[in-house]
Image (cartoon, grey):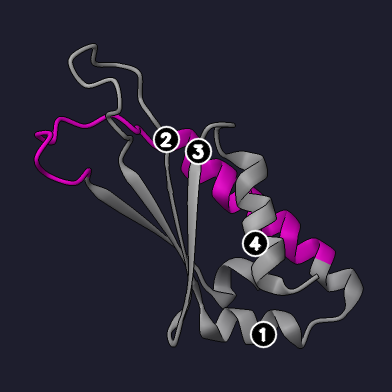
Amino acid sequence: MAFDDDIVKAIRQLMPDDAEIRVANTVSGLNVGVSWKLHDDPERPNKMSKTIRIVVSHEAAQDYAATDGANKAQTFRRINEYLSGKLAAFDPRHNAPKHEPPPVEQWTISSGVLFG
């Protein structure tokens, strides 16, 4: 399985079941957008959470590709710990008016996150 697929799988496992996940592979790396319906405003039944933009740098993806099997497992443990910690501190609620997009919070997965 490719690194991009592994990352998206790890993200899906950590996020709410009804999360919408959008993936874009760009020149600078992998961008994964995550949001879900909040169900906190009866006037806005389709109000979405703040968007989490998870950016995996191109360098981190290349460093991962050069890693052997045992270290890859350790790397994914670190990714899960990083994302779990960020998600635990994340408040998805916001007060953006309905004519504006929800705020975006960026979480970056760099080589430092992967390899400590």
Q: CA distance from mark 2 to mark 1?
A: 31 Å
Please rate how many residues cluster around mark 1, counting C-alpha atoms within 10 Å: few if below 14, some from 14 to 19, many from 20: some
Q: Is residue 61 above or below residue 114?
A: below
Please rate how many residues cluster around mark 2, counting C-alpha atoms within 10 Å: few if below 14, some from 14 to 19, many from 20: many
Q: Could you tell me if the residues under marks 2 and 3 are in contact, i.e. CB atoms within 8 Å? A: yes
Residue 40 lies, in percent from the top left, at 30, 16
Residue 91 lies, in percent from the top left, at 35, 32
Mark positioned earlier in the residue sequence (3 or 1): 3
Mark positioned earlier in the residue sequence (2 or 1): 2
Q: Could you tell me if the residues under marks 2 and 1 are in contact, i.e. CB atoms within 8 Å? A: no
Instruction: Give amino acid for label 3.
Output: Ala
Kindly identify which numbered label has been placed on residue 110. none
| Left or right: residue 49 compared with residue 89 | left
Residue 66 painted magenta: no
Report the residue marked by disc 3: 19
Residue 79 lies, in percent from the top left, at 64, 58
Kindly identify which numbered label has been placed on residue 7. 4
Q: CA distance from mark 2 to mark 4?
A: 19 Å
Which one is closest to the eye, mark 4 or mark 3? 3
Report the residue marked by disc 2: 36
Q: Which range of residues does the magenta coloring cover?
A: 73-102
Residue in the picture at 73% in, 65% down: 75
The C terminus: image quadrant = bottom right
Is 84 in front, or is 101? 101
Q: Could you tell me if the residues under marks 2 and 4 are in contact, i.e. CB atoms within 8 Å? A: no
Instruction: Give amino acid for label 1.
Output: Asp
